[in-house]
Amino acid sequence: MAGRSTDPTARPVPRRRGWLEIRWRQFRNAPRPVVRAVGSSLAVAAILGVLVLAYDVALDRGVALPGGDLRVLAITLDVVIVLLAGTLITWLIVPLPSGSTGRRTRTPWSAALGFFAAVPIAYLVLVATLQIVRPLLG
């Protein structure tokens, strides 16, 4: 009888969880600062992604826009704005824990969390809008 103890006061051995169950539990119980960092970057990236998509569709349909075809500049500005906004918003809304002093502080670590959350989100939103949604629009 491996895994069972003969001591009646011993705690039962917890069951082993599978990889997917562990990841699902981590996803459901994500730390609030991470959720805030990802959420703020995702909101900015989604808005800018829709604007880049509208610009791309307008150019392909022959709408004469001032400046000509500036898609590369639009995508570059999209990424830069998402990175900056994700960094700044996260720095503003994710203070460090107060500890025993009760004073909430903001440090570069909050900004770093926002920046590193914004990097993949900027890329994924652009891929989703320009490679998945754009072909569906024709």
Image: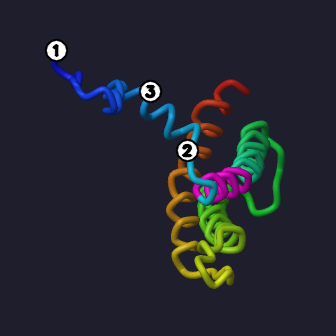
The front one of 125 and 23 is 23
Up-down relation of residue 29 to residue 91 (above or below): above
Callouts 1 and 3 close, C-beta under 8 Å: no
The Cα atoms of the two marked residues, 2 and 3, are separated by 25 Å
The front one of 23 and 71 is 23
**Circle 1 SS class:** loop
User: Residue 100 location in percent, x, y?
Assistant: 60, 80
Kindly identify the residue that appears in the image at 68 percent across and 81 percent down.
102
Identify residue for label 3: 21
Q: In which quarter of the image is the N terminus?
A: top left
In terms of sequence position, does the residue under pointer 1 or pointer 2 come before the other?
Answer: 1
Up-down relation of residue 36 to residue 125 (above or below): below
- Image quadrant of residue 131? top right
The front one of 42 and 127 is 42
User: Residue 63 location in percent, x, y?
Assistant: 83, 45
User: Residue 130 location in percent, x, y?
Assistant: 62, 39
Q: Which residue lies furthest to the left in this view?
A: 2
**Circle 2 SS class:** helix
Is 136 magenta? The answer is no
* Residue type marked 2: Leu
Q: Residue 124 carries which label?
A: 2
In terms of sequence position, does the residue under pointer 2 or pointer 3 come before the other?
Answer: 3
**Circle 3 SS class:** helix
